Image: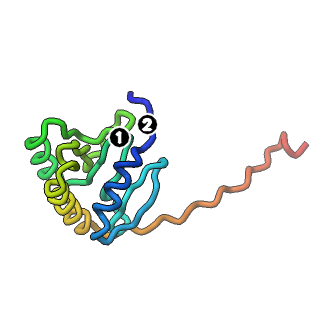
Amino acid sequence: MTKWKKASEELGELIGESVSEYEVEFRKMFGSPVYFVNGNMFIGVHGDGIMLRLQEEDQQKLYDEYDEAAPFTPNGRRMREYALIPPAVYDDEIEFRKWLDISYSYVSSLPKKEKKEKKKKAAPKKTKKSEK
């Protein structure tokens, strides 16, 4: 298991600039910049990498084109629709835009995810011991 690594500020700025043309919502998850479309996660920084949501056949195309591309597996658990894109993609403006467009089209087609109400913590129940 890899040790948690702080999100790269440089990559955070890169994706922030790159997604500015899309209708996205910015949030931080575990201190990392992540962008959502209609409540569905789209793209984010994880450590020193960028993860992008792609449907299965597009992930396979990415893996076929780039040996360094890999499934996104934070803490050893694979997130099915997410791939880590290699620097060869995000260092090339045209290639990065191509993959952003593919991902954005897919994520935009997903049903809108409603925000969950935060549950209020229930007061601790009194036990017979605590009443004495």
Numbered disc total: 2
Lateral position of residue 25 relative to residue 131, left or right: left
Instruction: Tell me where residue 49 appears, x and y as whole percent.
Output: 31, 42
Residue with the most extreme top position: 1
Q: Secondary structure at mark 1?
A: loop
Q: Gap between marks 1 and 2, in whole Å?
A: 8 Å
**Horizontal side of residue 56 vs 8, given as left or right:** left
Q: Which mark is residue 5?
A: 2
Circle 2: element type: loop
Q: Residue at x 38, y 40 (%)?
A: 47
Provide the residue designation for mark 1.
48
Please state the horizontal and vertical placement of residue 116, each as a whole percent of the image.
Answer: 48, 64
| Residue 10: % across, % down | 37, 48
Asked if 121 appears above or below 5 in the picture, the reply is: below
Q: Residue at x 30, y 58 (%)?
A: 42
In this view, the residue in front, 72 or 65, is: 65
* Amino acid on which the number 2 mark rests in the picture: Lys
Query: Hey, which quadrant is residue 43 in on the image?
Result: bottom left
Q: Characterize the local packing of mark 2: few (<14), some (14-19) or many (20 or more) Cα atoms within 10 angstroms.
A: few
The structure residue drawn at horizontal position 42% and vertical position 69%, both measured from the top left corner, is 114
